[in-house]
Amino acid sequence: MKFAAAILFAASLVSSAGALAKDWVVLQVDKGFQPATLNVKVGDTITFVNAETKKRRHTVYTDAAEFQYIRIPKQLPGEKASILIKNTGKAIIRCALHPGMKMTLHVTR
């Protein structure tokens, strides 16, 4: 009986941890990121959505060393891509095609 209770407790911890993670949506529109600043936690997911009404492609990248996995090479209008956040820190997210596009990302535990 103790073993079954331990399994249930472990399963509830896993379930609770999963429930704490959030999926944030960032729109790419009018050559900008909305929101321009985002505060997330490790384990959260950011979904980048190209919400342009014009035929405008976007990319997503950062030069921050701890966030080199944040890379979306090309997004056409209507496309979306999700990235799981793995590290703490701060990063400036940019679009390689539109130098004025930037978003500040703050990640905590």
Image (cartoon, rainbow, N blue to C red):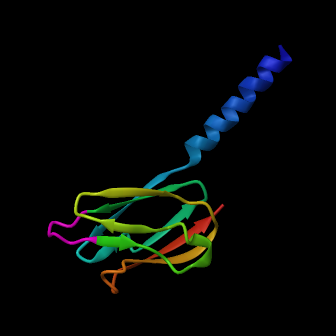
Q: Position of residue 92 (x, y in %)?
A: 49, 79
Furthest-right residue in this view: 2
Q: Kindly identify the residue that appears in the image at 54 percent across and 55 percent down.
A: 44
Specify whether residue 20 is painted magenta.
no
Number of numbered labels in the structure image: 0
Residue 3 vs residue 83: left or right? Answer: right
In this view, 94 is above or below 72: below
Q: Quadrant of residue 79?
A: bottom left
Q: Position of residue 14 (x, y in %)?
A: 66, 37
In this view, 65 is above or below 69: below
Q: Over which residues does the magenta segment extend?
A: 51-57
Specify whether residue 54 is painted magenta.
yes
Q: Kindly identify the residue that appears in the image at 49 percent across and 55 percent down.
A: 45
Magenta part mainly helix, strand or loop? loop
Furthest-front residue in this view: 73
Between residue 79 and residue 105, name the one nearer to us. 79
Q: Position of residue 25 (x, y in %)?
A: 38, 58
Image quarter in which the N terminus is found: top right
Q: Kindly identify the residue that appears in the image at 67 percent across and 31 percent down.
A: 12
Q: Position of residue 46 (x, y in %)?
A: 45, 59
Residue 61 vs residue 9: left or right? Answer: left
